[in-house]
Image (spheres, grey):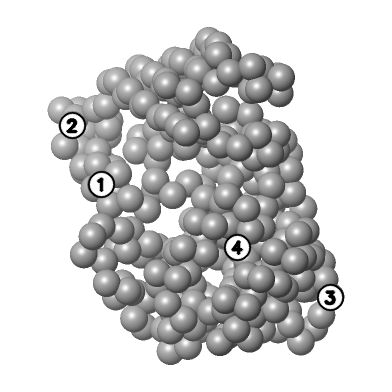
Amino acid sequence: LLRASLQRMEPERLSNREALLERISSGCHELDGPKAVGVSASLAQLDSPVRICLVGLGRAGAFHMQSLRFVGARVAQLVCVVDTNLELARRTATEFAASDCVARATLEEVMADVALAGRVDAIIIASTTDTHYGLCKLALSASKATFTEKPISHHADEVDEVICLAKAARVPFLVGYQRRCDRNFRALRDLIADGALSSEPGRHGVRVIKCTSRDNPRPPEEYLRTSGGIFHDMLSHDFDMIHFLTGEIPDEVFTVGHCYDPAIAALDDVDTVVVTLRYASGLLATVDSSRVA
């Protein structure tokens, strides 16, 4: 599953709105930091806003709502919100009444409404983890630019299926490993790629990587029940970042864990983990992660 999840799609140059959507994704690192003022150079090239359908108005959906408010309606317009809690979706839609935002209970309803589906350029999937696979298939089958929170799926064959579908659809497809958009990580990756840490041509020169991540305060239980567990929910970010920096996939993975929180133990999960990874180049990496520390 880790190997499948780390596959990267090389974006193809597309035309018109699809190209603009791609430039947004490739330029997202320009929006971070206290001096960010609305839009990056890429976003400034938009001749009309990208019209977005947001699926899921829970923990992750709230973050995307904040981002949409930040970039503003000139860049992105929320034209549809989807949540199984239809009353919540309706309340949210009223906030974005200026863009004629509508509420629906399912993405299937949106896609079945030809007029409404025609107003949607891109779909953000921020619903519970167990729904990502089906929603990605639905969005990509409709040739909509798609952003999904991770993971695509808990099953490697389903990850492969969605990646192949995205390539066939030839639309932008992004998975929510947001650290790739952090300018500091991108600068570090560029240094490594340029050989700044290596004295041997063709080798990245990185020998040891240590990752530490925390998720405190602990997410609510309703989130944890569908999160896929600490490895899919938290450590996948660290595994992805090691791959992003070095281009390597581990040959061996060793892990130990413990659970201090009885509520998490009841979900057959752990809340504190240490992982050691060994790579073909000799690189050794450790990841320690906790929801309670």
Instruction: Name the kind of residue labelled 2 in the image.
Output: Leu
Which of the marked residues, 1 or 4, is nearer the chain's N terminus? 4
Q: Residue at x 58, y 18 (%)?
A: 261
- How would you rate the neighbour count of disc 4 (Cα within 10 Å): few for under 14, some for 14-19, many for 20 or more? many
The disc label shown at residue 103, or none: none
* SS at badge 4: strand
Which of the marked residues, 2 or 4, is nearer the chain's N terminus? 4
Mark 1 and mark 3 in contact? Answer it, CB < 8 Å.
Answer: no
Task: Report how far apart the C-alphas of labels 2 and 1 lie in the structure.
Answer: 16 Å
Instruction: Name the kind of residue labelled 3 in the image.
Output: Ala
Which of the marked residues, 2 or 1, is nearer the chain's N terminus? 1
> Residue 54: x, y in percent?
63, 66
* SS at badge 2: loop
- How would you rate the neighbour count of disc 3 (Cα within 10 Å): few for under 14, some for 14-19, many for 20 or more? few
Q: Is residue 173 above or below residue 259?
A: below
The part of the image, by quadrant, that contains residue 166 is: bottom right
The disc label shown at residue 197, or none: 2
Q: Which residue is mark 3?
A: 112
Task: Report how far apart the C-alphas of labels 3 and 4 lie in the structure.
Answer: 18 Å
Q: In this view of the protein, which residue sits in the foreground, 278 or 145?
A: 145
The disc label shown at residue 124, or none: 4
Task: Report how far apart the C-alphas of labels 2 and 4 lie in the structure.
Answer: 37 Å
Visible residue check, residue 154: no
* SS at badge 3: helix
- How would you rate the neighbour count of disc 1 (Cα within 10 Å): few for under 14, some for 14-19, many for 20 or more? few
Q: Residue at x 73, y 57 (%)?
A: 135
Instruction: Name the kind of residue labelled 1 in the image.
Output: Asn
Task: Report how far apart the C-alphas of labels 3 and 2 lie in the structure.
Answer: 53 Å
The disc label shown at residue 184, or none: 1
